[in-house]
Image (cartoon, rainbow, N blue to C red):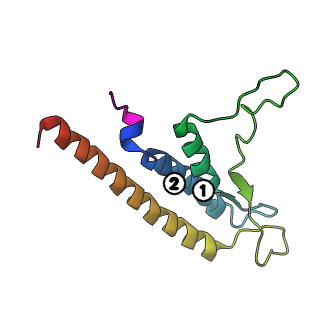
Amino acid sequence: MAITLDKALGIHQHALEGRVKRAEVLANNLANADTPGYKARDIDFQAMMQKAQEGMSGFGMSRTHESHMDTSTMGQDSELLYRVPHQPSVDGNTVDSQQEQTRFMRNAMDYQASFQFLNGKVTGIKKALSGQ
């Protein structure tokens, strides 16, 4: 039985990709902290991982009749949501710089953890291939 690289690496590669996307969104929020009317956004990481797990399992919805909804285009940006502010500013900006910095740092730590898991998997594969 052959093992694929996707199965060998597991969910870690998807987690790493999700952390990169979330870092981009949070950095964008921080960059627009003083932009009037800017609405802070964030990624639903859990929804992203659920979607990745469904894709890995091979079980997905399929369209069996032309009157059924097409699920291939649904939820492409479903992970990207607007954040409800704790204290909105007068100019309509919903970015709280301190909370965004905290979220960014937490995401950076989670990215590092995902990277270490992925590195451990790759190291294990290399050892198995070299017979160690």
Q: Secondary structure at mark 1?
A: helix
Direction front: furthest residue: 1
Does residue 130 sit above or below 40 in this rendering? above
In this picture, is 44 found above or below 57?
A: below
Q: Which mark is residue 45?
A: 1
Give percent across and percent down for residue 23.
54, 56
Image location of residue 65, percent across then percent down: 82, 22
- In space, the residues marked 1 and 2 are separated at their CA atoms by 8 Å
Give left or right: position of 87 versus 29: right
Whichever of callouts 1 and 2 sits on the residue coming sooner in the sequence is: 2
Give, as a three-letter code, the residue at label 2.
Arg
Which of 103 and 78 lies nearest the eye of the viewer? 78
Q: Which mark is residue 88?
A: none
Which residues are drawn in magenta? Answer: 1-6
Instruction: Tell me the residue that label 2 is attached to.
Output: 19
Residue 127 relative to residue 91: left or right: left
Q: Quadrant of the C terminus?
A: top left
**Horizontal side of residue 116 vs 65, given as left or right:** left
Q: Amino acid at mark 1?
A: Phe
Residue sitting at x 35%, y 55%: 117
The nearer-to-camera label among 1 and 2 is 1
